[in-house]
Image (cartoon, rainbow, N blue to C red):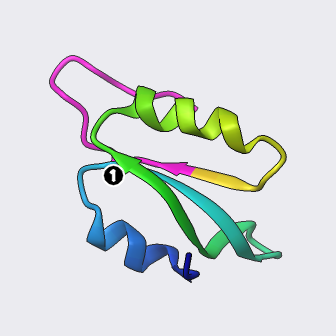
Amino acid sequence: MVSKKIEQIRKKFQREWLLIDVDKMDEKTTTPLTGKLLFHSPHNDEVHQVALKHRGQLLLIHSDGRFPKGYVAAF
């Protein structure tokens, strides 16, 4: 797997949930900068199942924020 900028990964897989193994962060802002895409899917439950197999790693689970009508996200 090749490390890429998080923004590049996000643009390539729009409207999907992403699981990224973060390998570089901006320490001042704690913003993930680069990482390796481990998995992507339009279904968040699939991404969370894969994430369970990668415990102990610094992971980023990302959604583009578009949810079906009637759904919201809280963090």
Q: Is residue 6 magenta?
A: no
Give the tally of numbered discs: 1
Looking at the rendered image, the quarter that the C terminus falls into is top right
Q: Is residue 42 above or below residue 25?
A: above
Q: Tell me residue 46's x, y (percent).
A: 42, 32
The percent coordinates of residue 70 (x first, y second) are 21, 17
Which residue, given by chain and number where applicable, does mark 1 sit on? 64
Identify which residue is drawn at 25% across, 33% down: 67
Look at 55% across and 82% down and name the residue there: 2
On the picture, is 57 further left or further right than 73?
right
Query: What is the quadrant of the N terminus in the image?
Result: bottom right
Q: Position of residue 15 (x, y in %)?
A: 24, 51
Report whether 26 appears left or right of 9: right
Which amino acid lies under the numbered mark 1 shown in the image of this protein?
Asp
| Residue drawn at point x = 54 percent, y = 29 percent | 49
- Magenta span of residues: 61-75
**x 78%, y 41%: residue:** 55
Prevailing secondary structure class for the magenta stretch in the rendered image: loop
Q: Nearer the viewer, residue 52 or 71?
A: 52
The location of residue 17, given as percent across then percent down, is 38, 46
